[in-house]
Image (tube, helix red, strand yellow):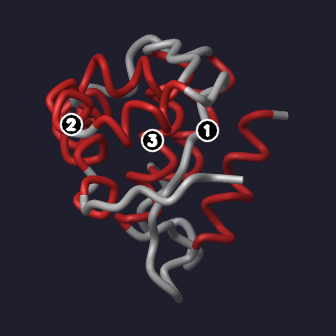
């Protein structure tokens, strides 16, 4: 069970904010470094302008790209590695956050999306990608 952290660090999303620009730059350059299968999936999902009425929204696209970037490009294996690389100041500012991320021996990728923003589409895409 996750421990409750009694501050706003997780609500401020320091890791997401730190990753946002890097993921966008990587995506804008054509997803360099991904496997051929990943490239074909990303191109199918996101480069079919005008071909279909079924399109991912920008927030869905960024969510999928962020998970793929962290896993496939950066090879991040734990949440602590992600914080150390992108938001070390958040760890330094909160012993509770440090304790929380150190207690997780896996990446624990998480997406924060509002109700009605298409989380099911994102999760379905990530399941296809991981398969």
19 up-or-down from 4: above or below:
above
Q: Is residue 9 left or right of residue 129?
A: left
Query: As displayed, is residue 81 above or below residue 16?
Result: above
Foreground label between 2 and 3: 2
Q: Position of residue 79 (x, y in %)?
A: 49, 29
- Badge 3 is on which residue? 65
Inter-mark Cα distance, 1 to 2? 17 Å
Q: Residue at x 16, y 37 (%)?
A: 93
Residue identifier under label 2: 90
**Marks 1 and 3, the one that precedes in the sequence:** 3
Query: Looking at the picture, how far across and down is residue 39, in whole percent?
Result: 55, 27
Under tag 2, what secondary structure? helix
Tell me the SS state at disc 1. loop
Q: Dot 3: what SS?
A: helix
Residue 48 located left or right of residue 87: right
Q: Residues within 10 Å of mark 1 (few under 14, many from 20)?
A: few
């Amino acid at each position: 069970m996750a421990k409750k952290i009694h501050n706003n660090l997780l609500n401020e999303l320091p890791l997401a904010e730190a990753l946002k620009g890097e993921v966008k730059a990587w995506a804008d350059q054509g997803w360099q470094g991904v496997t051929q299968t990943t490239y074909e999936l990303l191109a199918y999902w996101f480069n079919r302008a005008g071909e279909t009425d079924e399109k991912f929204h920008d927030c869905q696209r960024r969510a999928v790209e962020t998970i793929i970037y962290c896993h496939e490009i950066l090879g991040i294996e734990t949440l602590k590695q992600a914080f150390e690389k992108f938001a070390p100041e958040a760890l330094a500012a909160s012993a509770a956050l440090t304790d929380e991320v150190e207690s997780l021996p896996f990446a624990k990728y998480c997406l924060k999306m509002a109700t009605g923003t298409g989380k099911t589409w994102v999760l379905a895409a990530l399941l296809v990608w991981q398969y």
